[in-house]
Amino acid sequence: MKTGDGSTTIHIPEWNEQYHSKHGAIQEANHVFIKMGLNEFLEQENLKEISILEIGFGTGLNALVTWAASKDKGVKINYNGVEAYPVAVEEVSQLNFANEIATVNAVTVFEKMHETAWEDFHEITEDFILKKQQKFFHEIEEHHAYDLIYFDAFGARVQPELWTVEIFEKMYKATKQNGVLVTYAAKGSVRRAMLEVGYKVERLQGPPGKREMLRATKV
Ligand SMILES: C[S@@+](CC[C@H](N)C(=O)[O-])C[C@H]1O[C@@H](n2cnc3c(N)ncnc32)[C@H](O)[C@@H]1O
């Protein structure tokens, strides 16, 4: 289905849920994960190489916008996308993200992101290394591994078990010192779960169509 900014997303009829905001898939990804996540983190930390964990690789949109946003910044990205239920190739081929973001080589890069095998590191471009891992979020056991976490699970309305203290404990352990987690969600219960595991939490302006979002920092 088409979203408000002309970019497509996948709709799940049984849950009445989408992979992205109905107001604009690319717009949401750029606001929540790039503007409030990647860009602000790089401004604060000024690193030459960072590791990103994505909670729900899904269609690969967040990986694509991260590549596009980072490609002229002189930073190397190690991108780890965790996903239990990979999106079928036929569905990916119906998404228009690569054309819509209008960045040179986006179509080739997006195809490469999807063609590369799971479980290994692949050089998508010189400065963008991708590892897709097919597993459940609760199987994540890394410690101090990631500078930035994109927490992009389906909403708590449909998957409340993914917005719990138990899951955020795993996220907190996986976050490096001064690392940041960003999510489109703004619910009080989610904020409290983040605070309980030790994150400092900020409410930030949300993407179009949503008043607020959350950013959590491991200070
Ligand atoms: C909101 S979508 C992610 C959208 C994605 N970031 C994108 O840009 O397309 C949530 C994703 O989490 C995956 N998922 C749901 N439950 C999961 C679980 N327990 N473990 C791992 N992945 C899960 C879904 O298959 C879906 O791809």
Image: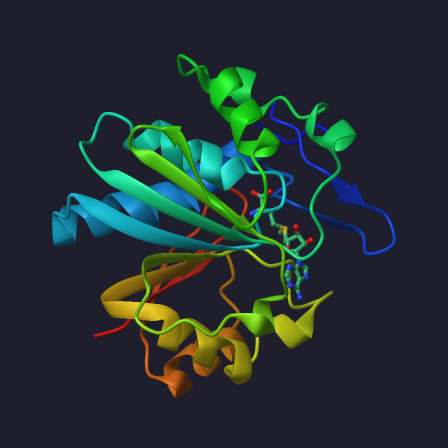
Tell me where residue 13 appears, x and y as whole percent: 86, 47
Q: Residue at x 53, y 26 (%)?
A: 112
Please, is residue 78 above or below residue 200 in the view? above
Quadrant location of the N terminus in the rendered image: top right
Residue shown at 46% from the left, 77% from the top: 170
Q: Quadrant of residue 75?
A: top left
Tell me residue 42's x, y (percent): 20, 47
- Name the outermost residue toward the bottom: 196
Q: How many marks?
A: 0
> Quick one: quadrant of the C terminus?
bottom left
Say whether residue 219 is left or right of residue 194: left
In this rendered view, identify the residue nearer to me: 160 or 51.
Answer: 51
Q: Quadrant of residue 195?
A: bottom left
- Name the spot of residue 161 as percent of width and height, x first: 66, 76
Please, is residue 5 above or below residue 133 in the view?
above
Q: Where residue 49 sits in the image (x, y, percent)?
A: 21, 46
Colour scheme in the image?
rainbow
Residue at 43% of width from left, 14% of height from top? 105
Quadrant of ligand 1 in image = bottom right
Residue located at (33% from left, 49% from top):
36
* Of the pair 60 and 38, the residue shown nearer to us: 60
Query: Of 206 and 10, which appears nearest the observer?
Result: 10
Please tell me whether residue 193 is drawn above or below residue 78 in the rendered image.
below
